[in-house]
Amino acid sequence: QVQLVESGGGLVQAGGSLRLSCAASSSILSSDGMGWYRLAPGKQRELVATIAGSGYLDYADSVKGRFTISRDTAKNTVYLQMNRLKPEDTAVYYCRLWAARFGVRDYWGQGTQVTVSS
């Protein structure tokens, strides 16, 4: 069982920046996949950014050039640096962990609220 705890959300004005963190309760490996997803009111959950076990990075088109995902395996943490935030980035952001060593199981954090005011 792995617990993921997100932090770093908050209220920010449009154009501002936030850095989200997701800390795992146990060791993460460089071969693990981790990612950030978000859920906005009235919308479906969407992928924001992921980092695969291969190191491949994937971003939603809406955040490319503004958001950067990274991980620090020594700290068992994945980050999401969010720059030039827009009101449409307002959502609850969730961290996800998956790996072949977990089989079909994946793990999710409890979410952190990001609100961008115009």
Image (spheres, grey):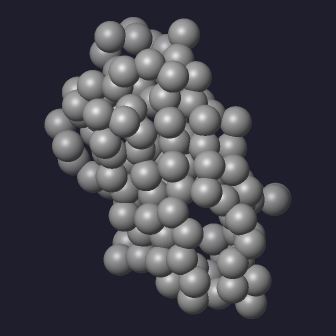
What residue lies at 54% left-to-right and 10% top-to-bottom?
1
Which residue is outermost to the front? 75
Give the image location of residue 100, x and y in percent: 31, 15
- State whether residue 85 appears in this view: yes
User: Where the C terminus falls, by quadrant?
Assistant: bottom right
Image side of residue 17 versus residue 42, left or right? left
Give the image location of residue 58, x and y in percent: 32, 54
Give the image location of residue 117, x and y in percent: 76, 83
Image side of residue 13 versus residue 21, left or right? right
Instruction: Pick whichever, 69 or 103, lies toward us.
Output: 69
Instruction: Pick whichever, 21 or 35, lies toward us.
Output: 21
Which residue is outermost to the left? 54
What residue lies at 39% left-to-right and 9% top-to-bottom?
103
- State whether residue 87 appears in this view: no
What residue lies at 57% left-to-right and 88% top-to-bottom?
15
| In the depicted structure, whether residue 85 falls above or below residue 75 | below
Give the image location of residue 47, x and y in percent: 51, 51
| In the depicted structure, whether residue 64 falls above or below residue 52 | below
Which quadrant of the structure image shows residue 55?
top left
Tally of numbered discs:
0
